[in-house]
């Protein structure tokens, strides 16, 4: 895992105009801003697109009037049928989806067969997501990563803003990267909070912002903690790339962290300008 800090993207990333004549794009929409970003840029370059939005995860305000349908998380078979009906050839996963229990899932016929083939492998995110990509590709779709559509969305190396990590924070960043690297084989977390070399928390099912909030009550006297976020080695990057945005920075400020370190080339960054403004005003580095 790269130890370099990163800078983010323009507030509205661009999509190559070469994609304007590309095959119709299907967007599987979870929570957050990413589905809306992709849809907006498709409109900007004239690329046909269709959203299948996940109930309880995607934000209706983000989906807006983009052509779309809503499905439950367990209706994977219906989602595939919808994409076929709307002549989608390329699929991108956009936004976070909270992992349900099997009881909550209530799978349709095709989804039930999918999980039956997986067996216990569905327990791990990496195994599940890799199998999902294989399933879609077997159905004739191409699964692409968001950054192939939003090239400027990937973080690049180098600190930015008015503040930079000091020697103690740099050591905490290295500690965090080592922890994430060690946990990769166990398919656990993309984020960790470290203070003075002590791991305050590791991201689990709650997500990054909830991790930050949980760690706010654990901080010690002295140099403040750092959030470190990086992709898991071996994870299916087309479906599960780490993302940060203004909400992440606001959570870090509220938790009195010293800053945020993200992996260059391995993290999507949204609302860059707002993140910089928030960080500079509060004295945090990014």
Image (cartoon, rainbow, N blue to C red):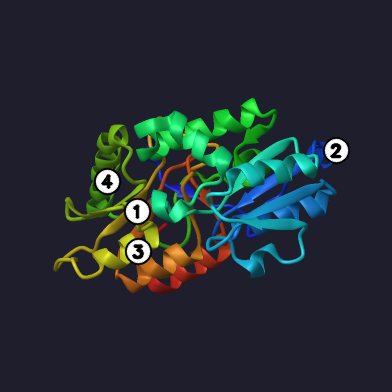
Measured Cα–Cα span from mark 2 to mark 4: 43 Å
Say if residue 235 shows up in the picture: no
Q: In the rendered image, which residue does mark 3 sit on?
A: 210
Image quadrant for the N terminus? top left
Q: Which residue corresponds to the image point at 60% horizontal and 38% vertical from the top-left?
A: 145
Choose the circle earlier in sequence order: 2 or 1. 2
Tell me: residue 280, above or below residue 142.
below
Count of numbered circles in the view: 4
Q: In the rendered image, which residue does mark 4 sit on?
A: 176
Pointers 2 and 4 in contact (C-beta within 8 Å)? no
Q: Which residue corresponds to the image point at 15% horizontal and 66% vertical from the top-left?
A: 220
Q: Residues within 10 Å of mark 4 (few under 14, many from 20)?
A: many
Q: In the rendered image, which residue does mark 2 sit on?
A: 21
Choose the circle earlier in sequence order: 1 or 3. 1
Q: What element carries label 3?
A: helix
Q: Which mark is residue 205?
A: 1
Q: Which residue corresponds to the image point at 38% horizontal and 51% vertical from the top-left?
A: 261
Choose the circle earlier in sequence order: 3 or 4. 4
Tell me: residue 255, above or below residue 242.
below
Q: Is mark 2 on a helix, strand or loop?
A: helix
Query: Image quarter for residue 219?
Result: bottom left
Measured Cα–Cα span from mark 3 to mark 4: 18 Å
Residue 130 appears left or right of 88:
left
């Amino acid at each position: 895992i790269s130890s370099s800090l990163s800078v983010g993207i323009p507030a509205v990333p661009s999509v190559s105009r070469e994609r304007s004549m590309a095959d119709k794009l299907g967007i599987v929409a979870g929570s957050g801003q990413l589905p809306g970003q992709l849809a907006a840029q498709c409109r900007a370059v004239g690329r046909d697109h269709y959203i299948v939005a996940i109930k309880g995860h995607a934000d209706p305000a983000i989906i807006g009037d983009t052509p779309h349908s809503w499905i439950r998380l367990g209706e994977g078979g219906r989602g595939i049928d919808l994409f076929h009906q709307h002549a989608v050839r390329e699929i991108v996963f956009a936004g976070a989806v909270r992992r349900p229990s099997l009881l909550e899932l209530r799978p349709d016929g095709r989804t039930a067969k999918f999980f039956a083939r997986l067996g216990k492998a569905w327990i791990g995110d990496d195994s599940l997501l890799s199998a999902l990509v294989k399933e879609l590709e077997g159905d004739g779709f191409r699964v692409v990563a968001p950054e192939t559509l939003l090239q400027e969305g990937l973080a690049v190396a180098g600190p930015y803003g008015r503040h930079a990590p000091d020697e103690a924070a740099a050591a905490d960043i290295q500690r965090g990267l080592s922890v994430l690297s060690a946990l990769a084989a166990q398919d656990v977390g993309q984020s960790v909070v470290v203070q003075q070399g002590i791991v305050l928390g590791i991201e689990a099912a709650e997500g990054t912002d909830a991790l930050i909030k949980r760690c706010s009550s654990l901080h010690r006297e002295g140099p403040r903690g750092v959030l470190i976020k990086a992709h898991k080695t071996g994870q299916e990057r087309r479906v599960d790339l780490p993302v940060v945005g203004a909400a992440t920075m606001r959570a870090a400020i509220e938790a009195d962290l010293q800053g945020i370190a993200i992996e260059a080339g391995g993290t999507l960054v949204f609302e860059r300008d707002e993140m910089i403004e928030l960080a500079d005003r509060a004295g945090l580095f990014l």
